[in-house]
Amino acid sequence: MTRTAGSSGKKTLAAIREAGLDLIHEHGFEAMSLRQLATRVGLQPGSLYNHIETKQDLLFDLIHNHMVTLLASIDDALDGIEEPIERLKAFIAFHLTYHIERKREVFIGSSELRSLEPKNRRKIVALRRDYENRLCEILDRGAAKKLFKIDDTRVSAYAILAMLTGICTWYDPKGRTNRQQLIDIHTRLVLQGVLK
Amino acid sequence: MTRTAGSSGKKTLAAIREAGLDLIHEHGFEAMSLRQLATRVGLQPGSLYNHIETKQDLLFDLIHNHMVTLLASIDDALDGIEEPIERLKAFIAFHLTYHIERKREVFIGSSELRSLEPKNRRKIVALRRDYENRLCEILDRGAAKKLFKIDDTRVSAYAILAMLTGICTWYDPKGRTNRQQLIDIHTRLVLQGVLK
Amino acid sequence: MTRTAGSSGKKTLAAIREAGLDLIHEHGFEAMSLRQLATRVGLQPGSLYNHIETKQDLLFDLIHNHMVTLLASIDDALDGIEEPIERLKAFIAFHLTYHIERKREVFIGSSELRSLEPKNRRKIVALRRDYENRLCEILDRGAAKKLFKIDDTRVSAYAILAMLTGICTWYDPKGRTNRQQLIDIHTRLVLQGVLK
Amino acid sequence: MTRTAGSSGKKTLAAIREAGLDLIHEHGFEAMSLRQLATRVGLQPGSLYNHIETKQDLLFDLIHNHMVTLLASIDDALDGIEEPIERLKAFIAFHLTYHIERKREVFIGSSELRSLEPKNRRKIVALRRDYENRLCEILDRGAAKKLFKIDDTRVSAYAILAMLTGICTWYDPKGRTNRQQLIDIHTRLVLQGVLK
DNA sequence: CATGAATGAGCCTTCATTCAT
DNA sequence: CATGAATGAAGGCTCATTCAT
């Protein structure tokens, strides 16, 4: 590979991240070896350490990056929408779209929390809580305006999030149902579920 | 100590299974070592092989056992109930209860599919499909009787299952919401979601 | 190798210790690899861990063992001798003999202190102090009886110990000077040095 | 900062040498990594190779440099002194002073001989022999003049050198005994030891 | 059945060294 | 001269598994 001064490092790191997402998604973090990763990127195992601190660090980096992006994106998606029902619809559409497009990140972000060191896990869990809160607020405001009937906000939010997130365990872009249909189906299920 | 012939072995295997569920749930299958497992059971690592074939075999055994029990139990729970709405309610109550009581098995059964050898995985996936079909049938029959409005049976079933299964990632028996409340909340969410 | 029940483990550990002494003496602790050690003993590297905890542990074990033996032996050698000059002679003869016969242990015990973890090092340094104190006491008693003239007990003890210990860096059993001659030469040097 | 042509390089090399002495003295040659060394000097590891050939080369350079200086210095110190007893006193005073002031060099020079490649080791051992010979000559001449009683010149020389060199394993400039006192103590021990 | 000891493969990581920029 | 990125070898250690006792 030819190196273009200064850019090679960043490109390699990007390739490591990309391959890392793939491999962790396929085999799980514990089951992925840095040898595999290095081979996939075209490096010797030791060379990875020019770009990452440790294997654990790579995992944290991937998940953290994902969470930060997720938070920024949801705020973007909800920006300017005030009406609770519309906000809920926007949330659903956004969540599904994002989870379809970033299956790997999302999957890793929830299934590999367990592999994070306590300190790292706490940071991620806090960010995830932030995201959950976006939905809780929508539900609460809808309930306040007598639009929704919510018995327990957090339980309901978890239930809805679980439903919407489930998609990334089976979604196949080549499947028979297209993206918009999926959004419609889920929107109907959730919305009817919470409406008064 | 003299050993009651034939009984010690079964007790040991039961202890291995139990400890296996704990450890895989805590650390994941790949991250659990047979040394840990042996220690937890009070054996030397090598002695495990008097009770299990391989580590992979233990995993399959645990998941398979869980799936078979799950299927038998759901049939039991739905037995005698004909009316679609009642059947759906029964399904929801059963699924939640079972998933609350067997967090470990359920969690492992979905998160460690990845660690199963292809042949084993196929067997489990088939059983899971059987279980999903129970819900699909309920939805289909309810739709046939014009009670439910279902755009896509399998997608809806996955969505509902994801929602109901999500509980085992956060349920805490000492939490503020009791089991019946959880069933009520989820029943309302799901039922309203699918009703015409 | 045939295994005689129960004894194989201890023999293997003894072989590991022996080879460890050799290799550390030859190459230094840091420079000795467990692969080398395993090869020398006829094992796979991982099998060493059936007998030792860690590489560090092996080092500590070797040095600690040496120090404990050294202390027991000097007390034995001095037992029953009261007169300071005779005690000093006995100390010199013992020290030289022991250092000639256990070149490796002695050498490692002083040159690899640096490779011990702080906690381990502290334990060894304490034992070494005990040994030094045996000489200090002899010098002090001799001075009290006006037999010796000692300006500073500890400095003198260190000087004498350094002189006597030096032998294990160059002693060659096939050399031209025999053991008794060496003892005589050193006894004269030390004794004249401290006599009033 | 602009670099004064040709001077920066030498300063860097001096810094590398200095840091090398420190690190080898602290951790031993094998245990010191060029990464540590580079960090200490404020360089990247690769940059060291603009100043040194190899790690082994650096070690040889440090030890060789030390030996050459040592030889030049002892000749300086003995220059003009003819009388054997006075020469021996001068030797003792010089050796102690030098070893106190260059603890690191001296320590490395003896403890890391083992890490030198055979060819390099041979060169150093030859220089060391030269130094030992200075003492042997003094002893021999003293014996010839019936001032000393020496049974075996080389053994005696080794014993004396070991005693005097031992100081650099424990000497602490902030300790309770000052330099002159140390010289006096050792001079008495050695001189009495060899006098007829 | 359980044990202790062995195997062989593999793990993450560090190292000295090289070299295009 | 310095840097950043690469190499290839090796490091200590853990693992699932086997098997004589």
Image: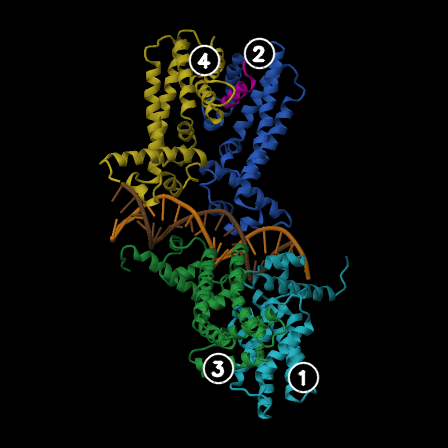
Chain colours: A blue, B yellow, C green, D cyan, E brown, F orange
Q: Main secondary structure of the magenta part?
A: helix
Where is residue F9? Give x, y as percent: 47, 59
Q: Is residue B158 magenta?
A: no
Residue at image coords 60%, 77% = C149
Q: Is residue A63 above or below residue B177?
A: below
**Which amino acid, by three-letter code, is at mark 3?**
Asp
**Residue B153, visible in the rendered structure:** yes
A24 with respect to D136 (left or right): left
Q: Chain for mark 2?
A: A
Residue D125 quadrant:
bottom right
For mark 3, give the secondary structure.
helix
Magenta residue span: A149-163
Q: How many marks?
A: 4
Q: Residues within 10 Å of mark 3 (few under 14, many from 20)?
A: some
Q: Which mark is residue B150?
A: 4
- Pointer 2 residue: A148
